Image: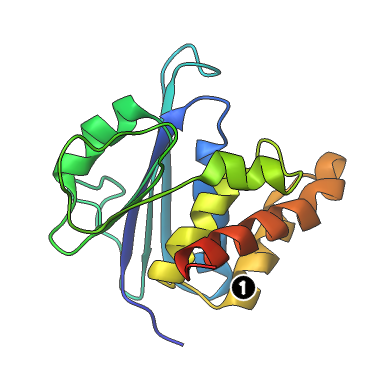
Amino acid sequence: MSHQELQAVFAGFGGQGVLFAGKVVAYAGLIEGREVSWLPSYGPEMRGGTANCSVTLSDDPIGSPLIAHPNVLVAMNQPSFDKFAPELAEGGIVVYDDALITPGSELPGAFGIPATSLAEQAGLDGLMNMVLVGNVWARAPFCSRETLDEAVGKCVSTARAHLIEKNKEAIALGIEAAHGA
């Protein structure tokens, strides 16, 4: 199954699961045999500081892990939205938690969803990141749905294996939100 090239930036505060979200997407690419780049970047504070990662999934060799103009942005806080949204490639999409971010101006391809409250209402506290991943997948499928679930299983540590199903539920919530459910 062939998908378009994904050049995504996941950005927010450390502790929001920014790097984990990017890792799940990158792992999905590995499972499907695609070329993959995952480049994490975080401030010295980590938890509470800024964190972001760039993920590229391609059917062709990847020349550089750096992404100047992402075609997907997952923004988990206002500073990240403000920094990366202006760099979005033409026709790209931005998915963000509308309780945490105010776009400020009309941005084509920007989709605000109540990711934190959706997660909390479903008893999935702390999984806003995976709600956003599900929402991105629904808008720009970068792998099969089965692969996405498999990637979650590969990325959650054995010490946290009890959270695998909760992560999958959070992804499903994000998908439903994209379809207006």
Front residue of this view, candidates 84 and 118: 118
In x, y percent, where is residue 127?
Answer: 64, 42
Q: How is the image coloured?
A: rainbow
Residue 23 appears in the picture as rendered = no
Extreme-bottom residue of the structure: 1
Position of residue 109 relative to residue 160, above or below, is below
Report how many numbered discs are placed on residues in the image: 1
Position of residue 113 relative to residue 180, above or below, is above
In x, y percent, where is residue 160?
Answer: 82, 42
Extreme-top residue of the structure: 45
Which quarter of the figure has residue 75?
Answer: top left
Residue at 55% across, 68% down: 181
| Residue 43 falls left or right of residue 104 | right
Secondary structure of the residue carrying numbered label 1: helix
Position of residue 165 relative to residue 31, above or below, is above
Residue 146 appears in the picture as rendered = yes
Name the kind of residue labelled 1 in the image. Thr
In x, y percent, where is residue 44?
Answer: 45, 13
| Residue 43 falls left or right of residue 66 | right
* Residue bearing the label numbered 1: 147
| Residue 120 falls left or right of residue 177 | right
Which quarter of the figure has residue 151?
Answer: bottom right
Label 1: few (<14), some (14–19) or many (≥20) C-alpha neighbours in 10 Å: some
In x, y percent, where is residue 131?
Answer: 57, 52
Residue at 48% across, 67% down: 180
Residue at 66% across, 36% down: 126
| Residue 162 falls left or right of residue 50 | right
Residue at 57% across, 36% down: 17
